[in-house]
Image: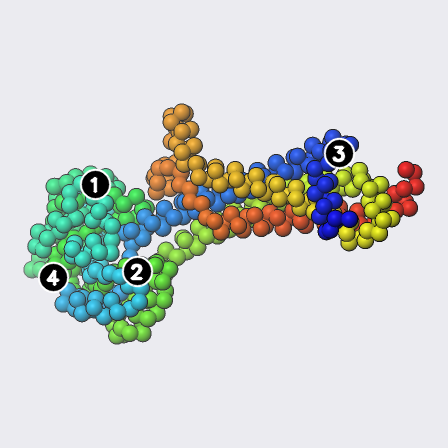
Amino acid sequence: MIRPYPLYIGLRYVRAKRRNRFVSFISFVSVIGIALGVMALITVLSVMNGFDYQIRAQFFSVAPAVTISTNDHISTSWQALSKKVALVPGVIASAPFIDGKGMLINQGAVSGVETFGVLPKEEIKISEVPNKMQNGSFFSLTPGSFHMVIGVKLAESLGLQLGDKVNLFTPQTTATPFGVLPRFRQFTITGIFYTHSGFGFDSGVAYINMQDAEKLYAASQVLGGLHLKLSHVYQAQQVSDILSQRLPYNYVVSNWTETFGTFFKALAMEKTMMFVILLLIVAVAAFNLVSTLMMTVNDKRMDIAILRTMGASPRSILLVFMVQGGFVGFIGIGLGIVSGVLLATYAPDIVNWIQHITGRQFISSSVYFIDYLPSRLDGMDVVRIALWSWGLSLVATLYPAWIASRTQPAEALRYE
């Protein structure tokens, strides 16, 4: 006899024509169900990976990974601080800033903003904002010019265009013979950027020259420091810990995980929950194998009895039907992986084609930060899906195979 014979007989049962066509139909449905579930899992996770990647790429193109803040005069100390920070592994660039809160007022329209005083030649090392200008130039922020660069949504809300004047009021005050007055200055809009990143960058951030910021804000009441760019954003906490140990007590180190970490954890949790929910679809399809194998066991009772009388052990009978069910699951998983990879690869093109045919825009940049369907296939996701689906298929075969292994030859052959 061919060994291992449980494998040979199990595969033979898969290929053999069944006397009951309904069993063949249920088996076919099981394969298609598993394939559809696996395909859906791969496609949905690839799309979620695409959204996650795009959000992270756009966010970290404008947001600093690590921020060093101090109340000291950063304009005179930032170069020495930058040299010290550059020695920390993972830090690839830094740029000085002065951070102040303010209120922009233009013809009765009011909007609160976070104002960053920067040096354009240094800022371009750590941020993509200078490369995302819709109008004007980021390098127009020269000392003493009192020029301002704002986001496109902020410009729209205040009705501002290139060359317009706008008043920036600060929370600080100045004592004059006429009483205590708020500190403010008129700025000229010389640049409008559009980052697509959301998180308030396009609607709540304004850039001015660092020297102009020092003149506008009282130095003792404003934060300054360095924004850092890292070789890998997930090193932020490690770099922050090193800097906290090396820098004096008057420097405060923070990173993106403290400010926006909850949002990205929510994205990861959403992907995990989607994986579990869609895996249930695969589980339902896989457990269709239970009914398929139960009917197969009833159909093959005489064969089982003959094998037992020829010396086959209950364990061998169990393995025969586990092989049969496992191979059916394997076929479904294989079809699902092939179709899922193809669909995930061409999903953006398919959605664009549907949008073109129907004339409807399904994805809005105002909601998702992008106006197209991203897809990013991850090999590890495919492996995880295949292993979980294979495991569920094997679990589904256990009960029918156990029933087959308990078949008594005398009982099965009594009426044959």
Q: Quadrant of residue 74?
A: bottom left
Q: How many marks?
A: 4
Q: Amino acid at mark 2?
A: Leu
Question: Mark 2 — residue?
Answer: 230
Counting residues from the start of the chain, the first of labels 3 and 1 encountered is: 3
What residue is rendered at 70% in x and 37% in y? 15
What residue is rendered at 36% in x and 67% in y? 238
User: How much space separates mark 1 and mark 4, taking CA atoms?
Assistant: 39 Å
Q: Quadrant of residue 29?
A: top right
Callout 3: few (<14), some (14-19), or many (20+) C-alpha neighbours within 10 Å?
A: some
Counting residues from the start of the chain, the first of labels 3 and 2 encountered is: 3
User: How much space separates mark 3 and mark 4, taking CA atoms?
Assistant: 96 Å
**Can you name the residue that lies furthest to the front here?**
1
Counting residues from the start of the chain, the first of labels 1 and 2 encountered is: 1
Q: Is residue 76 left or right of residue 291?
A: left
Question: Mark 1 — residue?
Answer: 134
Question: Mark 3 — residue?
Answer: 18
Mark 3 against mark 1, which lies toward the viewer? 3
Where is 126 relative to 333, above or below? below
x and y percent of residue 214 in the render?
Answer: 14, 60
> What SS does tag 2 mark?
strand
